[in-house]
Amino acid sequence: MLKYNVLVVDDELEIREALSIYLRNEGINVFLAANGMEALETLEREQVHLIIMDVMMPQMDGIKATYQIREQRDIPIIMLSAKSEDTDKILGLNLGADDYVTKPFNPLELIARVRSQLRRYTTMGSLQPDEEQIRVRGLVLDKRMKTVQADGEEIRLTATEFKILELLMEHKGQVFSIEQIFDRVWNEPHYGSDNTVAVHVRRIREKIEINPKDPQYLKVVWGIGYKIEK
């Protein structure tokens, strides 16, 4: 059974610790960050299913952090703020926040909102058990549903393209030669100068990369083969 991971981002230690206790009592794993920069660093290292994000923080505030997160990820974000002005709330929601809670808040109400957002996220199909889903930053491959998303957008791949991408994503950082890819995907030995693999890789790049000429995910290691960048 999947255990949820929630990232709490707030510059007030007391709030981080209090929310951590409430969330862990609900069986939720918790990561903590004191500002937007720490939040972004955590997202690079850990799989996070929901973020509780304060607005006013040093170094990088919640508005800037939310903007950067939304460029690559579609996970739920609940914003916290001591401000009650509508403009502050509207700005956060327009940037992609899913919910907004004004301080001071009732911790039990916030936990209920966390549960609601996680249920909605799961129902929409964005979240699947870890063993069924492979993630590389904004690239998500679901082995059970045979779907691929790049930065929140569903990508249509052929069966062969899907198999190639699945192989590379399952072995992030490992370089596969054309011969190895051919053997694994086509289940037969590779002969001669057949460029079948190269053609399929080019098509995958055109579909998953914002700029195929400067790929962020599927990279070539000249003279050796291909890999998915960690």
Image (cartoon, rainbow, N blue to C red):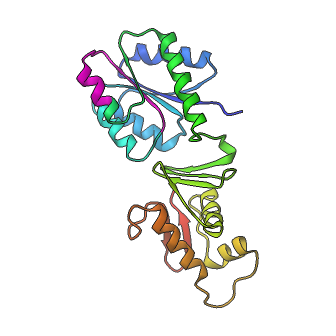
Judge whether residue 139 is colored magenta. no
Question: Residue most toward the right?
Answer: 188
Q: How many marks?
A: 0
Can residue 62 be seen at all in this image of the molecule?
no
Is 133 or 97 nearer to us in this picture?
97
Residue appearing at x 47%, y 48% in the figure: 152
Q: Which residues are magenta?
A: 75-92
Is 91 or 58 nearer to us in this picture?
91
Residue appearing at x 40%, y 17% in the figure: 13
* Residue 89 picture location, percent across and down: 30, 23
* Residue 220 picture location, percent across and down: 49, 72
Q: Quadrant of residue 168?
A: bottom right
Judge whether residue 77 is colored magenta. yes
Is residue 206 depicted above or below 6 in this figure? below
Is residue 176 depicted above or below 88 in this figure? below
* Residue 7 picture location, percent across and down: 48, 29
Is residue 66 depicted above or below 210 in this figure? above
110 on left or right of 187: left
66 on left or right of 221: left
The quarter of the rendered structure image containing the N terminus is top right
Q: Quadrant of residue 173?
A: bottom right
* Residue 176 picture location, percent across and down: 61, 71
Residue appearing at x 64%, y 21% in the figure: 27
Q: Quadrant of residue 41?
A: top left
Can residue 82 be seen at all in this image of the molecule?
yes
Residue appearing at x 46%, y 37% in the figure: 42
Question: Residue most toward the bottom?
Answer: 192
